[in-house]
Every structure is written in C-alpha cells, then in structure tokens.
C-alpha cells in the first residue's frame, strides 16, 4: 500500500488534562496501589530496591515509609511504600508524584517479575536504560510521563514480550523512532510519547506490523505521518487530532 503524507503543523493540541486523565483511568484498574502487604519473602530483592532508592534521591522523597526498615526482619514490619511483594517477587513499583530525582539504575532490571512500573510526575532524568529491554521480561505497563528523561527510545524496549502500555509523555526524548523490533511488538496496544522532541517520520512498518496497537499519541513531535497508519491502527494522534 502506498502511503501519502500530511502535515500536522496547523492542528490544535490535544488537551493535556485529558491525556493525564486517560493515563490514570487505564492504570487504576490494573496497578496494585501503594498500601500493599508486608515484604515477607522479598528479602532477596532488597539490594535492588535500595539501589533504586539511593539513585533517585530516596532521603528527599515525599513519602518513604518502610524503605530500608525491614532489612533485618521483613516478615514483622510494614510494607515499603509503593512496593508490592507477591509470593517472594516484586510485582509492582508505584511511586508517582513522590519527588523522585536522579537516574534509573540498571539494577532495577533484575526485578524479572515486575509487572507494573509507575513513576510519573517526578524529576527523574538521564536516559532510558536499554538493558531493561532484555531483563524486565514480565513488565506489562510502564507509566513515566512528566519526568526529565532524555535520549532516544531504546530499540530493545520494543522487544519486551509482555508490554501492553507505555506512557512517556512530557519528557525530553529526542532522535527518531526505531523500526524493528518495535514494529513487531506482539502485545503493545497503547503508546504515548506526546510533548517530547522526537524528529523524523513514523516508520511505515509500524502501521503494517503492529497488529495489536489501538492507541498511538505523538502530539508535538514528528511533523509528518503516513496516512496508512491511520487506516491500520485504531487511533493515531500526531497533532491533537485523531485519525480513525
């Protein structure tokens, strides 16, 4: 199919408030919230969690209750704020709006059973660790919008086998969008990259190969989008207007 091209420069931006509401609604029914049970059984992951705590300015977090307190006796103390421990595995990390700053440590990739990573509305900077693409094999949803991430979208993240939802709105990502393995992502249904500094055009392969993608947001980024994407994806917004 031959793709024609259209310019996005004359359209109005999609309302920011609505984007944030959509993000909250999508995650609210899936993410286990911060008041989860104790840390009994998860002692083997404490080093990873403390690496994350130290790398993201833990002492100045808005809420840090429980962090480090159960190192000696994890089964007799309360849970660590924002951490869900299930059957000896860390399955959810939810620290949104908690004054995190610093960078993401590579060791977080050791949480191979992590399913939900919710870090939006903080001040985390640096690049997105490419190693997560090979190691966070259970991750289903990542929401890290409204931070200060820079650099490119890692190719390796497109190979995350269970990823269905990714929101990186309002960061400082740059460069062009990768083709493979993103174009062959088997479960990804929602990708939101609004208000970054991405350039270039959308790879045509995204429209032809992303059979599960239904929601794609790229407001205030790429200047031209192949119309074939609007025909083969359920929802495309590269300017504040949708193509269905």
Image (cartoon, rainbow, N blue to C red):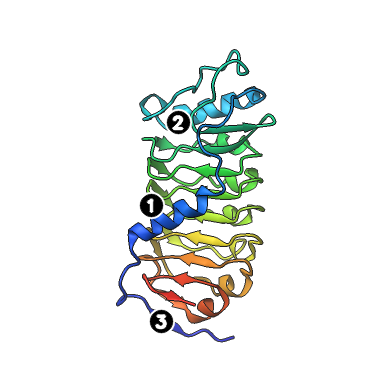
Q: Disc 1 designates what residue?
A: 171
- Along the polypeptide, which appears first: circle 3 or circle 1? 3
Give the vertical position of 163 relative to 86 (above or below): below
Contact flag, marks 3 and 1 (Cβ < 8 Å): no
At label 3, counting other C-alpha atoms closer than 10 Å, the crowd grade (few under 14, some 14-19, many 20 or more) is few
Residue at 56% x, 40% y is: 32
How many labels, in total? Answer: 3
Give the vertical position of 195 relative to 204 (above or below): above
The quadrant in which the N terminus is found is bottom right
> What mark, if any, has residue 55 been given in the picture?
2
- Along the polypeptide, which appears first: circle 3 or circle 2? 3
Foreground of the two, 207 or 142: 142
Give the vertical position of 80 relative to 119 (above or below): above
Residue 195 visible (yes or no): no
Foreground of the two, 201 or 75: 75
Seen in the image, is 145 located left or right of residue 133? left
Q: Disc 3 designates what residue?
A: 6
Foreground of the two, 148 or 86: 86
User: Residue 143: x and y, percent?
Assistant: 48, 49
Label 3 and label 1: CA atoms lie apart by 25 Å
- Along the polypeptide, which appears first: circle 2 or circle 1? 2
> What mark, if any, has residue 218 been given in the picture?
none
At label 2, counting other C-alpha atoms closer than 10 Å, the crowd grade (few under 14, some 14-19, many 20 or more) is some
């Amino acid at each position: 199919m031959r793709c024609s091209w259209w310019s996005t420069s004359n359209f109005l931006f999609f309302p920011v408030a609505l984007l944030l509401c959509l993000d909250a609604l999508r995650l609210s029914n899936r993410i286990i919230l911060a008041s989860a049970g104790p840390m009994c059984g998860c002692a083997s992951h404490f080093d990873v969690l403390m690496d994350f705590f130290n790398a993201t300015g833990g002492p100045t977090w808005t809420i840090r209750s429980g962090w480090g307190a159960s190192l000696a006796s994890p089964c007799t103390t309360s849970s660590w704020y924002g951490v869900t421990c299930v059957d000896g595995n860390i399955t959810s990390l939810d620290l949104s709006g908690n004054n995190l700053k610093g960078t993401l440590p590579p060791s977080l990739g050791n949480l191979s059973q992590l399913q939900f990573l919710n870090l939006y509305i903080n001040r985390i900077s640096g690049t997105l660790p490419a190693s997560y693409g090979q190691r966070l094999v259970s991750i289903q949803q990542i929401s890290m919008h409204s931070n200060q991430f820079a650099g490119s979208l890692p190719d390796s993240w497109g190979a995350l086998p269970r990823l269905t939802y990714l929101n990186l709105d309002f960061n400082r990502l740059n460069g062009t969008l990768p083709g493979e393995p993103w174009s062959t992502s088997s479960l990804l249904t929602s990708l939101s990259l609004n208000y970054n500094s991405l350039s270039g055009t959308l790879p045509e392969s995204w429209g032809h190969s992303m059979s599960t993608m239904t929601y794609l947001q790229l407001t205030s980024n790429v200047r031209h989008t192949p119309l074939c994407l609007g025909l083969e994806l359920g929802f495309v917004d590269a300017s504040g207007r949708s193509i269905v």
